[in-house]
Image (cartoon, grey):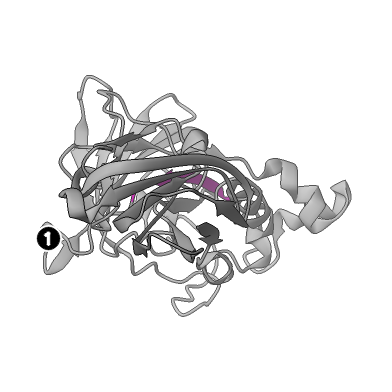
Amino acid sequence: MEMTCTVNLVNNKEEELNDKLGTLHDLPLRAALEDYLSDVFVDDAHDVDMLFYDQRRRGKMTFRESEVMDAEQRVFSLQVPASDYRVAAVANLSAVPMLSLQGEEDGYALSLVQKASKDPVPSHPSAIYAARRRMLVRDEGDQSFDLNFHMANTVAAVALNCDSCEVRSIRATFSGLADTFRILDSAYSFDQHIVLEAKVVDASPYVSSTVGNDEEAERFLYDIFWERWTKLPLMVCGVGFPSPSVGSAVVGTYPIIWTVNLYVTLADGSTTRNDIYIGKPLEPSRLMIVKGWLTANGSFMNTPPHQPYLPGPEFPDNPDQPADSTVVGVTVMLNWTEGMNQSPDL
């Protein structure tokens, strides 16, 4: 038989970048994020692992084939015993070492599992793809089958305007995301409390390349509209499994589906912790950008701060500074420490 393996990378990256990072001041950050995601939203796969589960033998694995793909599409010639199979496959697993394939002997238990850790788990460095289909292999003649791979993980980023805040460093983790993907069921589970460590995306090296020469880059940081000097926005980005489709808790009448834990260390050495509750599901193969503003004490706001944080008139309908409707609530803890000695400011 011949098996044609094809990677189907369907994502919303360009629409989300245009929507959330479409202004002139966002250009360096957009370029930095696109560069970072070039290793994540990849439309080819290095390795592919195909497992054949025989329906006539109670779904037990009877055949397995591992190949190097290194392409968006490749045809493999296989010698497979004739039977009625459910086929499950994983691509790019070698590029995501924090995931393991478990339950290989029983197709209904076959899962991509996030390796357990007491500490925050690292962000996935690449897309991970999975595929499934039924194949009735005859006992004579040649046959051809298509196996279509779809991205099983997803991307979230938090973009921060820090003009009102003296930031020494930032750190973010995401919680409420899945820990397991069952391939033949195409279902995610949330048995472990996974905390995903986000990466800081540095936009400063991209100012000259997106704006022009150094002199133009210096003028770029002066906001003529507000008549003030600005700072480059900051961003953290994490790649992991998706969130649930519905929330398990509420703020008022709004569902909390997953959470961003943002730690802002200020110039004086104090740290402000922001728990940002997201009311929109993080879906497979999608990019979600949450946009916000930091006040002088490191508190997160999903609407632009006005006086005394910014000079000039208020323009609540300014399309360059919209409210982010994905955020349903924020809990702020000033003077946060690892020992949980906090001064809460809700």
Residue at the spot 58% in from the left edge and 68% down from the top edge: 14
- Is residue 293 something that shows in the picture? yes
* Position above or below: 87 against 110: below
* Position above or below: 221 against 134: above
* Residue closest to the far front: 140
The verdict on residue 233 being magenta is yes
Image-based side of 224 in relation to 137, left or right: right
* Residue closest to the far bottom: 317
The verdict on residue 171 being magenta is no
Image x and y of residue 340, in percent: 20, 25
Q: The residue under label 1 is which amino acid type?
A: Val
The stretch in magenta equals 231-241
Image x and y of residue 52, in percent: 34, 48
* Position above or below: 221 against 337: below
Q: Which residue is label 1 attached to? A: 250
Disc 1 element: strand
* Residue closest to the far top: 339
Image-based side of 331 in relation to 316, left or right: left
Callout 1: 10 Å neighbours few (<14), some, many (20+)? some
Residue at the spot 46% in from the left edge and 55% down from the top edge: 309
- Given residues 318 and 259, the one toward you in this image is 259
- Is residue 41 something that shows in the picture? no
Image x and y of residue 99, in percent: 37, 35
Q: Main secondary structure of the magenta part?
A: strand
- Given residues 244 and 7, the one toward you in this image is 7
